[in-house]
Image (cartoon, helix red, strand yellow):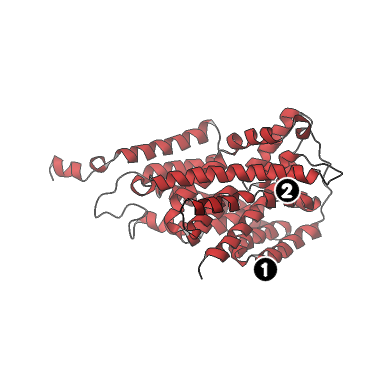
């Protein structure tokens, strides 16, 4: 082998400027995760995956996620077949406390209201020429729920899986940047200072019954949500039953950490510039941003609408927590509330619409899958 052959068989010989752009994007993700603490558990695996995925493979060597029988292709199979998202939901269920939502059920409406971003973006995507299946997969980005976006994309529009997954997780990470301006724009200082009454104590019996009854109701209304919500409520039952602590602990720690690593890295590695860096991908990012903004706005405005009919007013900032970026959007609501009044603690209350948003986005995904799946 001479030097010329060696050079032709190297990644340098096939490196394009678009690969360098995507490698820079991966580095930026890692930078934001480390210096700004923006969803580091997601952005570091995704960012490094982007770098790995944009090293040009050598012809005849199965290296990329798209190469048949490559190691990375087997890891990516969990994304393509929708295996990883339900396992993520299992872990989320095992670490979620639905007490605040159960103690103040009207806050569930805020989680439902935030899903308006999903359906308005669906309509907008259709108008821009995407197929109904592609539009449905793009619209779910507004729920700010990465696993749900990946799951629905794998079922409806696998060809758009890469850009949709990256867009969904990017906006999840940017919750502290995107949401506060919207919250300030649509609320007054007086509204942001509204104090919430302490939630009532929820009994163990209620906590155990809830995941069973909630699953039956949601799955019967939207059978397409059964995979995600089945795992979510199963994980929650493991937690609340108090007799399967070992299983609950595994689900909310070891299992979800392993799946997050595999999911994040695989999604990042799927962003090869040659297939990812297109006008369509950029349009998906724009639509995803619009969806997220509309979802946040819808939650805040619906809270203000509810206050027209409620004697006991709710803080409209809680509406922004209706997107299912758990627990980041709840933390942002809490931070904005504290800025206006250092004695106003909204975190516990914000978790109610936040976890309701998780359920809402999964139901929205189930409805879209049922309506657009073409069975």
Badge 2 element: helix
User: In the rendering, at what x and y percent does residue 219 appear?
Assistant: 65, 66
Q: Nearer the viewer, mark 2 or mark 1?
A: 1
Q: Residues within 10 Å of mark 2 (few under 14, many from 20)?
A: many
Q: Which residue is rendered at x = 23% and y = 41% of the image?
A: 13
Query: What label sits on residue 352 in the rendered view?
Result: 2
Q: Earlier in the sequence, mark 2 or mark 1?
A: 1
Going by the image, does 121 lie left or right of 334? Answer: left
Which residue is nearer to you in this view: 367 or 206?
Answer: 367
Where residue 294 appears, x then y in whole percent? 61, 44
Who is closer to the viewer here, 357 or 291? 291
Percent position (x, y) of residue 345?
A: 76, 36
Answer yes or no: is residue 84 visible.
no
In the displayed structure, would residue 305 be above or below residue 209? Answer: above
Which of 216/231 is in front?
216
- What is the distance, in whole Å, between disc 2 and disc 1 at their CAs? 23 Å
Left or right relative to 370: residue 320: right
* Disc on res. 220: 1
Q: Is residue 209 left or right of residue 124?
A: right
**How many circles with numbers are drawn on the protein?**
2
Q: Check the image and report above or below for 375 versus 170.
A: below
Answer whether residue 148 is visible to the viewer in this image.
Answer: yes
In the visual, does 159 lie left or right of 124? left
Report the residue at 45% width, 34% height from top: 28
Residue placed at 23% from the left, 43% from the top? 10
Q: Residue at x 81, y 44 (%)?
A: 308
**Residue 9, above or below 368:** above
Q: Which mark is residue 249?
A: none
């Amino acid at each position: 082998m001479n030097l010329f052959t060696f050079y032709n068989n190297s990644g340098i010989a096939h490196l394009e400027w678009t690969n360098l752009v995507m490698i820079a994007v991966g580095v930026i993700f890692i930078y934001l995760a480390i210096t700004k603490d923006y969803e580091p558990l997601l952005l570091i695996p995704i960012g490094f995956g982007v770098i790995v995925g944009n090293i040009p493979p050598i012809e005849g060597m199965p290296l990329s996620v798209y190469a048949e029988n490559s190691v990375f292709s087997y890891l990516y199979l969990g994304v393509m077949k929708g295996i990883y998202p339900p396992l993520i939901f299992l872990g989320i269920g095992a670490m979620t406390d639905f007490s605040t939502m159960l103690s103040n059920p009207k806050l569930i409406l805020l989680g439902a209201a935030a899903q308006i971003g999903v359906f308005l973006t669906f309509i907008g995507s259709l108008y821009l020429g995407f197929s109904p299946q592609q539009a449905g997969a793009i619209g779910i980005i507004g729920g700010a729920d990465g696993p749900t976006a990946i799951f629905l994309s794998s079922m409806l529009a696998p060809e758009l899986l890469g850009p949709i997954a990256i867009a969904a997780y990017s906006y999840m990470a940017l919750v502290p940047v995107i949401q506060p301006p919207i919250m300030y724009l649509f609320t007054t200082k007086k509204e942001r200072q509204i104090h919430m009454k302490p939630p009532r104590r929820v009994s163990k019996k209620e906590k155990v019954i809830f995941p069973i009854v909630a699953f039956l109701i949601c799955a019967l209304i939207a059978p397409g949500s059964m995979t995600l919500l089945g795992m979510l409520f199963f994980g929650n039952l493991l937690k609340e039953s108090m007799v399967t602590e070992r299983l609950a602990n595994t689900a909310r720690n070891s299992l979800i950490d392993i799946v997050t690593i595999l999911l994040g890295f695989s999604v990042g590695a799927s962003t090869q510039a040659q297939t990812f860096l297109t006008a369509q991908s950029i349009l998906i990012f724009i639509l995803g941003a619009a969806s997220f903004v509309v979802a946040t706005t819808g939650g805040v405005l619906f809270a203000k609408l509810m206050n027209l009919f409620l004697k006991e007013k709710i803080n409209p900032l809680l509406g922004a927590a209706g997107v299912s970026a758990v627990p980041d959007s709840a933390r942002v609501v809490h931070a904005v509330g504290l800025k206006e009044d250092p004695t106003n603690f909204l975190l516990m209350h914000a978790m109610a619409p936040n976890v309701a948003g998780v359920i809402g986005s999964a139901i929205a995904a189930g409805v879209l899958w049922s309506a657009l799946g073409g069975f």
